[in-house]
Each structure stands twice: as structure tokens, then as C-alpha cells.
């Protein structure tokens, strides 16, 4: 009871003492963008430390990365917003991910800011996401502050990297800040540059309320908490508000700012970043990119939202226990609330029952979502082989959309198969042009154009089948370019193709979750590699397990998982050979009966085997 009253006192004290009336000219909204592992989260730690936002007792590495997955992998998965005080200024920081699979998180953060710190590693220089994220920031007219990090390392190349930044941004050498986020060297200069260079937010506190929702989280006790940036107007605790796209009306039970913990306040006006709790229980009622406005005096039009999500990888996600279907739906909806780049729709499988066809931005994104379902919602799921959407023209003239191999009609009913193509733009160093072109050619790409952006940087344009990109294209592109390659694309219609349905059979029974649609020339090598991979992954049984790859009724590859044999003759010491033979024959008969009724359990790792094919 004592702790309860203490928490009430703390919240009331915060409500009375939080300064919501910071003038707009003293507000700075900025984000940190960079390539993965260039020191964004470490720089954010130092900024929080220097501004005394986090006490020494609360300080830890990657303080904004609150997921176990983020700390384990050393990557930022979610954007994290936090408010700092620096002299008379209020600084709203949004730390963003650096991996290409989470670029949508970056676009959401950029929409809520006026400026960005572009962090470049002094030991590695400009890399893929540096360029990609920079373009996102420039499209939104953000003020860019270049920051060269890790200058204290022996392997640092400050002059060479500074020249690269000057070539990329067209700025002067004096504009580039040099710091070491690990030691704290130069961090004060970064804070001064944020105050001096990033413009104050624009907006009218007296105008009708316009607040952009850039993120949401689900709290099991308080419902959905929406994070917003106010463009115009003022939002007060107790106001009657509505979400523009859904039209749903709520009371603002609590409004506050995002420090290390949420701190409530009486009101927030234009230019501020904060949160709203209004008792929303259904995740369908909140959409990232939506506009919050007052019911009595609504704004004339909503704020323009973010760019449309472009899923790269589609895969089926099924509960291990079919009774958990509705629970899985609720879990995915809550994840989508927190990660707007996840898309899903219901589908069914003969082998796995009812599940969902989910769209992901990449294979790492898919892996992270699966991990989060397991850790945060305690859901055991099976993920099927990734695929894309195909159009099938039947012999009777009708057209059919096929999302997964189980929906593929019989070959004699198919007149033509069309697969989606993308218009891909790859920016890389000139040193890697040969391997990149070879990779795209191997993926059935058609070279359209190549342009030198600078003396050392080239843009290559290809038309590529989307189905060839969803497997290992990203990994291979990053490997051959040593991490220096940015990849962007847009769907460029459908083109005729020769596709076949590749099935995997276990002891003659097809496993539709392992089936895939592939180009006819790739069917044999993929089938062979899948059989070899599954042989290593499927545990040995009391009987032989035949693993076959088939196209229709034609078997194109086979591997056998040998049975586990018990030494039944171990107790026969001497005597006639017929005694041993009798025992072996009896075992052989038992093995035959077992094979007739034996079931092969396929581990989860087998469903992901195709992703790891070399």
C-alpha cells in the first residue's frame, strides 16, 4: 500500500511540475540515422548522459534498446523516442534502426523531425544505409548534421571519410562534427550543433489540433499508448479527441512527454512530441500515420502519412497447436501496432491448418517477428517457405492469384504463368560493379542502365523477378559489396515466366509447408539442396525416412535418413548362426510394420532450411 501511494505522489508531482509551455523556438526534434553498427545507440547514450536525462544508477549500454533481442544482437529494431533538457532547450530524440529491413521505422521517425544526425563510422566510411537513410531525410527536407564517430580508434581514417561525406552531402569540412561516442569526446559539440543548426518546429498552437501518430505500443493494463508529434494546436488532458481515419472518439485520459519513463503533464502544444492514453483496447482502432484531432473543432484535413509499406518477403505463419489460432491473430495485431511494416491476412494449409500469410521487409525482419511472437506472446509458430504473389491464366480464360504453392492449379489447367518483376536500383562502389552485375544476372535480371553518381559511386538499374529476391539476394549483395550497397525497388508489373511447383515428400507424403514455386531451371539445384539440408535436420527414426523433391509425379532428387538400429544380437554369445538370423529377421518385420504407421516429425529448423541454402 505504501508503494501504491508513493507512485501516486510521484505521478502527481510530475503532472504539476513538467514544463509543457516550452516555447516552440526552444524545441528541437531530431533523429539519428546511420548504417548498422556505426554507433547510433552509443551516441544516444552519451547524449542522455551529458544532458542528465539518465542518472548514473539508471545508465547502461544501449539504454534506449529495451528489447532483449536488441541487446543480444547489438542492433536497434524499434525507433525509440525520448525527451532531453539542454540549457533552456527541449530536445526530442528518436533513435532509429540501421538495418535495411527496418527502413520503414526510419521513415516514421523522419516524419516527426526537423533535423537528423547522420552518423558515419570513421573506420568504415559511407555505407549502404548511410546513403539510403540520407535520401529519406532529404526527401523530407530535414537539416542534416554530419557526425564522424569512432575517431579515437587506431584504424580511423578521418580525412578520407571526411572527403566521402563532403562528396555525398556537398558540405564543407568544417560542417562535419568529429566525436567518439564511446569516450564522450566531442558530444558537447554535437548538442551545440543540434541547437544551432536544426530549425525550430513550425505550427500554430491556437489552430485546430493536428497530431501525427508515429508509433504505438500495447500495455495490458492501460490499453494502447499512441506516440505523436503535434503539428498544430494544443492537446490537453481530458480533451475529447478522435482519430481521423477511423472516426473513433475518445477522452484523453492522460497526456505526457516521453522521458526515460512516461511523464504526464497538463497539456502539449504544437512542436512537441508526446504520448496519449485514452483506454483504447482494440489494435484495429489505431493506425500509424493517422491524425489525432478534436471532436468539437476538427482540422480540415489529415496530415499526409508515411510512404506505403512495400513487403519484400511473404511467408505463412501457423500456430503449432491449431487451437491457438485466435490467440495468434491477437498477438500479430498487437505486433502490427508496434511494427507497422508487418502485414498479414488469413490463409490455410492442408498440413498446418489455419494461419496467416504475413508480409515482411526482409529475412531478418521475418526472423525478428518470429522471435518476438515466441518471447513476448509465448506463441509457438511454424514459418513456411517465403514466396511472392503470382498470376495464373487458366485454359478456360479466367485469371487466378496464387499466394502459396498449395493454391497452384494442376499443370494441364494452366495456360500461362505471370510473375511480378521489380525495377531495382542498386548504389555501390565502382570496385564491386562486376560481382553485383553477375549476381543480378544469376537472378535472371535484365540490365537497364548504369550511371556514375561520383567518381567512386555507381547506380545500376535492373529489372528482376521479385521471387528471386526474397531468398538470399540481400545477404549475397551485402557480402559481395562488403556491406556497401543500398538497394531500392518498386514493383514493375507482371511478366510471363516458366514456373513449376517443387514439392518435398517425406516417405511419399507431400509436406505443403515446404513446397515452393520456382523457375524451371532452378528446380533441380534447389530440390537437391533442400533434400541434403533436410537430411541433416530431420532426426533419425526407427525406420528409414525417404526425402524426395518432386515436380508433379517426377522425382528429381532423393536423400534417405537411415534408421536407428538396436543391436538385438548383443545377448547371443556363440551358438548357431541361425539364432542371430532369427532375431534379425524378427527385427526386420517389426521395422516394416513401424514404417506403415510411423509419423515423421519435422522440426521448425527444417521449415527455415531453404532460407539458408548457399
Image: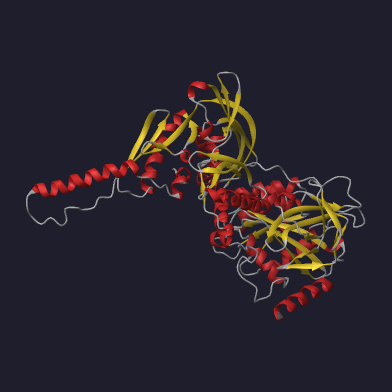
Q: Position of residue 82 (x, y in %)?
A: 72, 63
| Rendering quarter of residue 89 | bottom right
The residue under the point 58% across, 57% down is 377
Q: Position of residue 122 (x, y in %)?
A: 60, 58
Q: Is residue 500 above or below residue 515?
A: above
Question: How many numbered discs, if any?
Answer: 0
Q: How is the image coloured?
A: secondary structure
Q: Position of residue 493 (x, y in %)?
A: 64, 29
Of all residues, the one furthest to the left in this rendering is 575
Q: Front-most of 87 and 173?
A: 87
| Rendering quarter of residue 185 | bottom right
Of all residues, the one furthest to the top in this rendering is 396
Q: Front-most of 537 and 45?
A: 537
Location of the N terminus by quadrant is bottom right
Q: Position of residue 309 (x, y in %)?
A: 67, 43
Is 234 placed left or right of 458 in the picture?
A: right
Q: Is residue 328 above or below residue 529?
A: below
Is 155 placed left or right of 4 in the picture?
A: left
| Rendering quarter of residue 257 | bottom right
Residue 99 is at least partly visible in this image = no
The residue under the point 81% across, 63% down is 253
The residue under the point 92% across, 56% down is 206
Q: Is residue 443 above or below residue 196?
A: above
The residue under the point 56% across, 53% down is 368
Is 62 placed left or right of 17 in the picture?
A: left
Location of the C terminus by quadrant is top left
Amino acid at each position: 500500500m505504501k508503494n501504491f501511494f508513493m507512485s501516486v505522489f510521484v505521478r502527481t508531482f510530475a503532472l504539476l511540475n513538467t514544463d509543457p509551455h516550452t516555447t516552440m523556438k526552444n524545441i528541437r526534434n531530431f533523429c539519428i540515422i546511420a548504417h548498422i553498427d556505426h554507433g547510433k545507440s552509443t551516441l544516444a547514450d552519451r547524449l542522455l548522459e551529458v544532458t542528465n536525462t539518465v542518472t548514473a544508477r539508471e545508465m547502461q549500454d544501449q539504454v534506449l534498446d529495451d528489447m532483449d533481442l536488441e541487446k543480444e544482437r547489438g542492433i536497434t529494431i524499434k525507433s525509440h523516442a525520448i525527451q532531453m533538457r539542454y540549457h533552456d532547450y527541449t530536445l526530442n530524440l528518436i533513435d532509429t534502426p540501421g538495418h535495411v529491413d527496418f527502413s520503414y521505422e526510419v521513415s516514421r521517425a523522419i516524419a516527426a523531425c526537423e533535423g537528423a544526425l547522420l552518423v558515419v563510422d570513421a573506420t568504415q566510411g559511407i555505407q549502404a544505409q548511410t546513403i539510403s537513410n540520407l535520401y529519406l531525410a532529404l526527401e523530407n527536407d530535414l537539416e542534416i548534421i554530419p557526425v564522424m564517430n569512432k575517431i579515437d580508434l587506431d584504424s580511423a581514417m578521418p580525412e578520407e571519410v571526411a572527403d566521402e561525406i563532403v562528396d555525398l552531402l556537398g558540405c564543407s569540412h568544417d560542417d562535419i562534427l568529429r566525436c567518439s561516442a564511446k569516450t564522450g569526446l566531442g558530444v558537447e559539440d554535437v548538442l551545440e550543433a543540434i541547437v544551432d543548426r536544426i530549425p525550430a518546429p513550425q505550427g500554430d498552437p491556437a489552430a485546430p489540433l493536428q497530431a501525427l501518430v508515429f508509433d504505438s505500443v500495447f500495455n495490458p493494463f492501460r490499453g494502447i499508448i499512441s506516440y505523436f508529434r503535434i503539428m498544430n494546436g494544443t492537446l490537453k488532458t481530458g480533451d475529447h479527441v478522435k482519430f481521423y481515419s477511423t472516426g473513433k472518439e475518445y477522452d484523453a485520459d492522460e497526456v505526457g512527454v516521453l522521458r526515460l519513463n512516461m511523464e504526464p503533464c497538463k497539456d502539449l502544444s504544437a512542436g512537441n512530441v508526446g504520448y496519449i492514453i485514452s483506454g483504447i483496447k482494440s489494435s484495429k482502432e489505431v493506425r500509424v500515420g493517422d491524425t489525432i484531432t478534436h471532436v468539437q473543432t476538427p482540422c480540415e484535413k489529415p496530415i499526409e502519412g508515411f510512404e506505403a509499406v512495400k513487403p519484400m518477403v511473404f511467408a505463412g505463419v501457423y500456430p503449432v497447436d491449431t487451437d491457438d489460432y485466435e490467440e495468434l491473430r491477437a498477438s500479430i495485431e498487437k505486433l502490427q501496432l508496434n511494427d507497422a511494416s508487418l502485414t498479414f491476412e488469413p490463409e490455410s494449409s492442408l498440413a498446418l491448418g489455419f494461419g496467416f500469410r504475413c508480409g515482411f521487409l526482409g529475412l531478418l525482419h521475418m526472423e525478428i517477428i518470429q522471435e518476438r511472437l515466441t518471447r513476448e506472446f509465448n506463441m509457438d509458430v511454424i514459418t513456411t517457405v517465403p514466396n511472392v504473389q503470382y498470376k495464373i491464366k487458366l485454359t478456360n480464360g479466367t485469371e487466378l492469384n496464387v499466394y502459396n504453392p498449395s493454391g497452384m492449379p494442376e499443370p494441364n489447367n494452366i495456360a500461362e504463368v505471370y510473375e511480378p518483376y521489380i525495377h531495382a536500383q542498386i548504389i555501390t562502389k565502382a570496385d564491386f560493379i562486376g560481382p553485383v552485375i553477375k549476381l543480378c544476372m544469376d537472378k535472371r535480371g535484365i540490365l537497364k542502365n548504369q550511371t556514375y553518381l561520383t567518381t567512386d559511386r555507381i547506380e545500376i538499374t535492373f529489372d528482376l523477378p521479385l521471387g528471386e529476391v526474397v531468398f538470399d539476394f540481400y545477404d549475397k549483395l551485402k557480402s559481395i559489396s562488403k556491406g556497401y550497397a543500398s538497394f531500392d525497388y518498386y514493383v514493375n508489373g507482371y511478366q510471363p515466366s516458366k514456373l513449376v511447383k517443387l514439392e518435398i515428400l517425406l516417405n511419399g507424403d507431400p509436406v505443403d509447408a515446404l513446397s515452393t514455386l520456382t523457375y524451371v531451371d532452378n528446380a533441380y539445384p534447389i530440390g537437391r539442396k533442400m533434400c541434403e539440408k533436410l537430411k541433416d535436420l530431420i532426426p533419425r527414426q526407427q525406420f528409414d525416412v525417404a526425402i524426395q523433391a518432386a515436380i508433379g509425379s517426377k522425382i528429381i532428387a532423393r536423400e534417405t535418413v537411415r534408421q536407428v538400429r538396436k543391436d538385438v544380437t548383443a545377448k547371443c554369445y556363440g551358438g548357431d548362426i541361425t539364432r542371430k538370423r532369427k532375431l534379425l529377421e524378427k527385427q526386420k518385420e517389426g521395422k516394416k510394420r513401424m514404417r506403415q504407421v510411423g509419423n515423421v516429425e519435422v522440426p521448425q529448423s527444417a521449415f527455415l532450411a531453404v532460407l539458408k541454402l548457399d
